[in-house]
Amino acid sequence: MDITELITRERILCDGEVTSKKRVIETLSELLAKGEPGLAARPIFDSLIGRERLGSTGLGHGVALPHGRLSQSQRAVGAFIKLKKGVDFDAIDRQPVDLIFGLLVPDHYTDEHLRILAYLAEMFSDQAFSQRLRESDSDQMLFDLLSGWKPAVLELP
């Protein structure tokens, strides 16, 4: 998978200063709508917050992957926020979240949605990679890291 199919530099926010889970999702909604004809922040917010009500998308280790579906979406779209200071995201490890990748997919995406989430979960389970993201100081640096990440290749005996 090529992450640049999901994300652009314009949908990345480095060192965001938001103080609540709700505000993070509002900011993600605005970023996800950027450059996407026919998409507006409010319906995106409603989709993301509706998914959060089913259970937190906070994975632990300071990472969250809020995601939702929207019939108006024609393709999968991503946005990324690195916060200056983590916020309570109801994560499974109860730790504050400072790395948030938002994902919006069309209603008809089923297998694709799960494949993208699995890819993102693998990406953000790479602790060294997450640390490099945390050390980044610009949208461009974050974009370069995200677009350059490759899954580990398993070596067979």
Image (cartoon, rainbow, N blue to C red):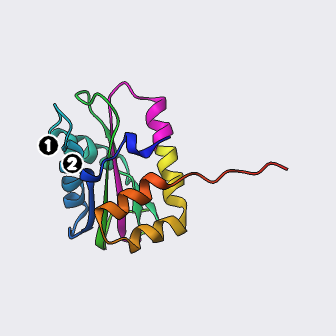
Left or right: 120, with 78 as reference point:
right
Where residue 157 sits in the image (x, y, percent)?
85, 50
Looking at the picture, tell me which residue is in the foreground, 37 or 93: 37
- Which residue is at the far right? 157
Could you tell me which residue is drawn at 41 percent across and 67 percent down? 133
Looking at the picture, tell me which residue is in the foreground, 107 or 75: 75
Residue 93 can be seen in this image: no
Where residue 151 sits in the image (x, y, percent)?
58, 51
Is residue 26 a member of the stretch shown in magenta? no
- The residue identified by callout 1 is 42
Q: Which residues are magenta?
A: 95-116
SS for tag 1?
helix
Contact (Cβ within 8 Å) of mark 2 with mark 1:
yes
Where residue 41 sits in the image (x, y, percent)?
15, 44
Where residue 97 sits in the image (x, y, percent)?
36, 67
Q: Earlier in the sequence, mark 2 or mark 1?
A: 2
Q: Which amino acid, by three-letter code, is at mark 1?
A: Arg
- The residue identified by callout 2 is 29
Residue 142 can be seen in this image: yes
